[in-house]
């Protein structure tokens, strides 16, 4: 998950977009749950701590 967190944080910092293929409803639901947690953590600390704040 660290690679996912790093990718999402980089996209947030660059005001970019992350594209993830969705082949299975269950898998994409789990992925979106992780996305939400990463984004909430990142935005709650102003992008300073990033993934380290989730641990």
Image: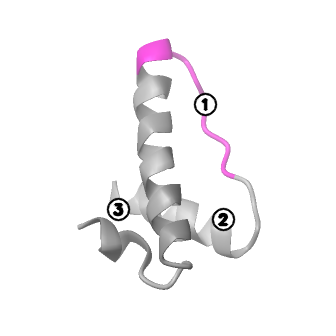
Label 2 neighbour load within 10 Å: few <14, some 14-19, many 20+: few
Count numbered badges in the picture: 3
* Badge number at residue 40: none
Residue at 48%, 77% in the rendered image: 45
The answer to whether the residue labelled 3 contacts the one labelled 2, judged by CB atoms less than 8 Å apart, is no
Instruction: Look at the magenta stretch and give its main secondary structure.
Output: loop
> How far apart are the two marked residues, 3 and 1, measured between alpha carbons?
18 Å
- Above or below, 38 against 43 in this view is above
Comes first in the chain, label 3 or label 1 = 3
Residue found farthest to the left:
55
Q: Nearer the viewer, residue 6 or 29?
A: 29
Task: Using residue 39 as the reference point, say whether residue 41 is left or right of it.
Answer: left
Residues shaded magenta: 18-26
Which colour style is shown? one colour
Residue highlighted by disc 2: 11
Task: Using residue 21 as the reference point, say whether residue 6 is left or right of it.
Answer: left
Residue 28, percent from left and from top: 49, 26
Q: Secondary structure at mark 1?
A: loop
* Badge number at residue 21: 1
Residue highlighted by disc 3: 2
- Above or below, 17 against 33 in this view is below
Residue 55, percent from left and from top: 23, 67
Does the stretch in magenta take in 19?
A: yes
Residue found farthest to the top:
25
């Amino acid at each position: 998950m660290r690679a996912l967190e790093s990718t999402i944080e980089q996209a947030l910092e660059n005001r970019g977009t992350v594209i993830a293929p969705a082949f299975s409803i269950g898998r994409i639901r789990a992925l979106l749950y992780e996305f939400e947690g990463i984004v909430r953590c990142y935005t709650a600390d102003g992008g300073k701590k990033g993934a380290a704040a989730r641990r």
